[in-house]
Amino acid sequence: MAAKVAVIDCQIAGIAGDMLVSALVDAGADRKKVANAILACQKFLKGSKITKVSFNKITTHGFSATQLTLSCNDGVHERKGSEMINALEKTCDSLELAGKARRFARGAMKSIISAEAAIHGESPDNVHLHEASSVDTLADIVACAVALDDLGLFDAQVYSTRVAVGAGKLKFSHGTVPNPADAVLHIFKGRQFVLEGGQAKDELATPTGAALLASIAQKSVDYYPPIITEKIGYGTGCKEFAGFANLVRVTIGTAPSAVEKDTICLVETNIDDATGETLGNLIERLTDAGAKDVTVLTGTGKKGRPAHLVRVICDNQLQNAVLDVLFSETGTLGARVQQVERVVLPRTILTVPVKIAGSTFQVHVKVVKDAAGNVKGAKPEFEDIKIISTRCNMPARRVAELVSVQVAKKTGAI
C-alpha cells in the first residue's frame, strides 16, 4: 500500500482555522465527531457557551464547499496562556485523543502562545491573550486535531502551497498594525513556509490558521508532490471577495511509488555531565516535543571523560522545539543540525478491535506493507496499550502480548 499524501492549498485565500476544519470535513472527516469535539471545548473555559455548531454546504464563486457555523458567547475577553493550555489538556482528556492528535493540538496552541509572548516580551505562561483567548480558537484547534486523526493524516506526508497572507492594515485589541499580523510572522519564523501577499487588502492568514498549518504540514511547495488523488475537500470562511473564492482546498491521496522519500532533521549534541535521571527525562521531553526518534549513545569524550551522544530525528518544522529542549534540559552549548533524506516503507493506521478481560477495546495499529501488498509488520499504539492496562488493572507488558497476538491474526501479520 502506498503512503498517504495530502496537500493543503492556501495560495489564493490563505488559511484560517474554521476554513481548514471545514475543508477536512468536506474531504470526509466525521462531521458529528468533529462537532462533538467543538462542543466539548466550552466545558473547560469558564464563561464560555457554544450555542450552535453546524457544517453547511454552500456555493461560493461556483464552488460547492463546506462552511462551519459556530455561534458562541464568551464573557471573558482576556486569558493567560496557561489557562488556554490547561483548557486544551482537559478537553483532550475528555475526548480521549490519541497521542499524535494531542501533540498536534498542544503544538498548535503553544505556537500561538509563544508568538504572542515573543511579541509582548512576556513568558508563555503569563502572557495575556485577547483574540486568541476565545473559545472558538480552542474549538478550531481541537476540531482540526479530531478531523486530521479521523482522516489518518497524522501518518501522511502533508504539504502546503505558498501561503497567501493578504495586505493592508489590521485593527485588533492593541490598535492598528500592518498585515500580516505579527503573530502570523512569528509562528512561521524559522519554518520552511513561503508567504506572499495574494489578491486582497485584507487578512487572509489568521494566527490560528497559521499555527494549525505549521503543526501538520512539512513545508510549502511550489508544485504538488506526486499524488494519486482520492479525496478533495473545500472549506470556506465567512468573508466574501470579488475576484476569487474564499476557499482552502485539501487534496488527499497516495504516493505512486512503492517507497517514500522525505527530508527530515537530524540534531546531535555531546554531553559529558548528565545523570541517568537527566537522560531519561530528556528522552521524555523530546518525545513530547514530537521527536520521531531519540537515541543516546555512550562513549568517551575529551580528557577521557564518559560522554553521551544524543541523536534526535524530527520533522523540519520541529527543529527549534527540539533545540529548545536540548539546551534547557542538558545545558549543552551547541548542537549539530543536518537535513537528511529518509527512505520509508508506506504505512497506514488501522483501528482494530481486541478483547481483553472480557471487554472490547479499539486499538490503533500501524501496518506496514511491501510493494506487493504483503503485510510486513503491525505495531499497536502503546498509548492504547497503557489505557487498556489501566482499565483492566493488568501489567502493560501482558496487555501488549495479548493485543499483539490478536492484531497479528486480524491484519495478516503472522
Image (tube, rainbow, N blue to C red):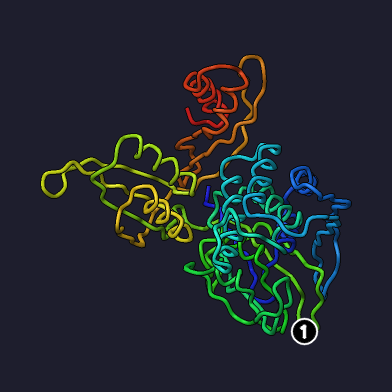
Say if residue 141 shows up in the picture: yes
Instruction: Indicate the amino acid at tag 1.
Output: Gly
Q: Position of residue 129 (x, y in %)?
A: 67, 61
Name the residue furthest top. 357
Nearer to us in this view, 143 or 59: 143
Q: Position of residue 125 (x, y in %)?
A: 58, 53
Give me the residue at 59% from left, 36% from top. Answer: 364
Q: Position of residue 7 (x, y in %)?
A: 60, 63
Label 1 CA crowd tier, 10 Å (few <14, some 14–19, many 20+)? few
Give me the residue at 54% from left, 17% from top. Answer: 394
Nearer to us in this view, 92 or 387: 92
Left or right of residue 241: residue 116: left
Left or right of residue 144: residue 191: left
- The relative height of residue 198 versus residue 113 in the rendered view (above or below) is below
Dot 1: element: loop
Q: Position of residue 126 (x, y in %)?
A: 60, 55
Can you tell which quarter of the image residue 76 is in?
Answer: bottom right
Left or right of residue 397: residue 104: right
Say if residue 33 shows up in the picture: no
Nearer to us in this view, 236 or 172: 172
Give me the residue at 54% from left, 49% from top. Answer: 155
Q: Which residue is mark 1?
A: 243
Name the residue furthest right. 51
How many marks can you see? 1
Can you tell which quarter of the image residue 177 is in?
Answer: bottom right
Give me the residue at 77% from left, 84% from top. Answer: 243
